[in-house]
Structure formats: C-alpha cells, structure tokens
Amino acid sequence: MADDVITRTGIARHGATRLPSVDVDSFNIELKDDDGFLGDRASKRAFRKILDSLRQPLKGNGDDPLGKKASADLGKSELDEALLGEDVGAAALVHGAIEEFAQELSHVTQRFLKTKAWADTERIVVGGGFRESRVGELAIARTDALLKAGDFKVDLVPIRYHPDDAGLVGCLHLAPSWIFEAHDSILAVDIGGTNIRCGVVETRWKKAPDLSKAAVWKSELWRHADDEPTREGAVKRLVKMLKGLIAAAEAEGLKLAPFIGIACPGVINEDGSIEKGAQNLPGNWESSKFNLPASLVEAIPEIGDHDTAVLMHNDGVAQGLCEVPFMQDVERWGVLTIGTGLGNARFTNRRKEKDKGKDEKKDNKSKD
C-alpha cells in the first residue's frame, strides 16, 4: 500500500486511493443497463430531454408556456424564472420535469448504493453545474425524499461551494499538510468537457486547519469548446493562465506553494496518464504519449524557489474533496456531479491517530 500512497517528494501518486484525509473507495464507476450508461439518465442533457418531451404535446397546439426557444437553449436563470414566475403553466411544466428527473436520479443513486464500492454510504453530496440553480436544488431535495421513501438510509445534499469553486478548493485536499505550514495558497486547475478553470486557492489554514474556510482568491475561465483547440494548444493556453495567476499571486504578496492540483475527467493512472473518460477534451488526452502533469512541470519547473509538484485526480473526486471538513460526522460518504455526464466518487474518512488513541484507551478501560 505504501507504494500507492507516497512518492519520493511526499506527494501522493496521481489518482491515488489514499489521500491525506480520506480513502477513495471508488471513482468514475460506469454502471450500465439495457439502454446504455446509467449516468446518461441523470445528466444536464437528460433533464433538458425530459423537459422537451413534456413540451412536445403543447407545441403542437401552440400552447407551450416556455415559448419557441429549444429546451437545450434555455438558461438556468430562465428556468428558475419560469419556476418562480406568475405563469402557472410554465411553473407546472418545469415542476413536472423536476419530478421526472428526480425519479431518474433516485433510480441511478439506488444502483450506486447497491454496489459493493458504495455499501453503507451515509451521505451523498451533489455537485456539478446542475446544482447551481433553484431547479437543481429542488431536484436534489425531491430525490432525497424519494430515497428515504424507498427506505434508503442516506442523506442527499447540495454541495456547499459554488460549482465553479468546488473542484478548485477540493484540490487543496490532494496536497500533504506540510505544504500549508509555510504557504498560504496553491494553484488549482479544474478541467471539463467545455471549460478549463484555473485558480489560486487560499488555504486560510491558520484560521481553520481543517481547511473549512478555504476559498478561491482569483480564478480564470477559458471556454475551450468555443475555440476548438488542439491538445497542444489547450496545454499552451493552460500554462499561460497558470503563469498569469502566479504573477498575480506574487504581486499580491501571497505565499504560493510549489504545488498544482488538477481535477480532470476520466480514470487517472498513477503515472499521470489518463486511461479512459477524457473523450470530451480537446484532442486525444488518452494517448500513452501524453502526460499533462509532466507537461506542466516542464513548462513551470519552479514556483518561487522550489521545484513544482503536480498532482492530478479525477474531477468528481476533487469536487467531493471540498466537502471533507463538513463530513466528519459520518464515516462513509460519496459525491455525484451532474454535468455533461454523471461523475461519482465514494470516500471513507481516514481516522486521525489521536482519535485512534482515544478509542484504544476507551477499549482498555472497558476491559478493565
């Protein structure tokens, strides 16, 4: 197990199953049924498809309260407005889509809970872009009610951080604690099928050693789907963004750690290559000749006066990790991220040595 955990530099390996605060029991599970991947039934696209199916009968009569705009083109704010507005027909339509989607999400979640990797899960946080709306919050709340009605003893809750920040903040939990003693911030990267977001994340470790007060100080977004770059072009742009953030952090007087955490779609191998699941990224990121962490170290060999360390993990794992400080009242918990697809990860909290010591003392007293 030691080889899987620690490298020469004291940084966990890419895609590690053992991290400073948690064990990653599973991530990026791809469950299937007769119709294909189950995750496709609980994605943002699936919600739009449900909404579209409810609108079709009304369109024929010219009675669609949501107008002529295609469901795929309706923004989150527009749907929230329809949900809360005075047009009861529009509100009913969106409510209907929420109900159907919640049924699907409940079914998919139940399938996860029935797998060995997700056994005894006590709480599930839901992240991703879908959570960033009233529609998403209601869908999550309704799914939670359906699970409890089905006698599943699990809580389904929205992720606390804004979806744009969750993956970046989660990257803090990839880093070993010694980094925080001498530095107050790190660089983080959240890569998606549409966007790449980079940020400087303040640890605020002195105020909260459990990182519960961590926050994104500054971030930059690039919508790569609009530019359709080559893989090499995407890496070049990413490096430029990171160098800009390094300069901004130095100008602000931040003590930036020589560490870059990366959240990336797919199954991440321990050498930093991507086994599968990166098909939505620009170019072939699954090639054996491509290694993003190595490319970044080559382009940014030092941060401050120290050699740069890079650690990459699955984006669903990274999003879930931002919840570590708030999951200490349970032992086993998971994350589902509703976006282009359905990301997933399950965690078991690692018990601190002092907690183990307390339990051992209790056991000895009970024996006496």
Image (cartoon, helix red, strand yellow):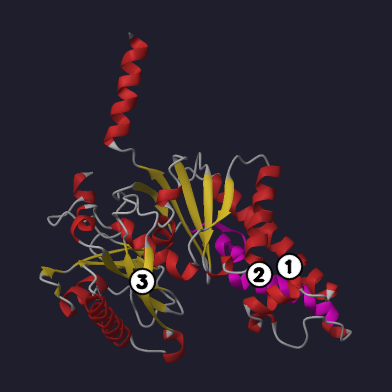
Identify the element where label 2 is drawn.
helix
The relative height of residue 52 versus residue 159 in the rendered view (above or below) is below
Cβ atoms under marks 1 and 2 closer than 8 Å: yes
Examine the rendering and report whether any part of residue 266 can be seen: no
> Which portion, as a residue range, is magenta?
30-58
Q: Amino acid at mark 3?
A: Trp
Q: CA distance from mark 1 to mark 2?
A: 7 Å
Q: CA distance from mark 3 to mark 2?
A: 33 Å
Q: Amino acid at mark 1?
A: Ala
Q: Position of residue 128 (x, y in %)?
A: 51, 66
Q: Which residue is mark 3?
A: 217
- Identify the residue shown where x is 12% and y is 68%: 307
Q: Which residue is mark 1?
A: 97
Q: CA distance from mark 1 to mark 3?
A: 36 Å
Left-right relation of 174 to 297:
right
Numbered circle sitting on residue 47: 2
What quarter of the picture does the C terminus occupy?
top left
Q: Amino acid at mark 2?
A: Phe
Identify the element where label 3 is drawn.
strand
Left-right relation of 63 to 295:
right
Q: Position of residue 287 (x, y in %)?
A: 29, 75
- Identify the residue shown where x is 39% and y is 78%: 196
**Residue ranking furthest to the top:** 368
Main SS class of the magenta portion in the image: helix
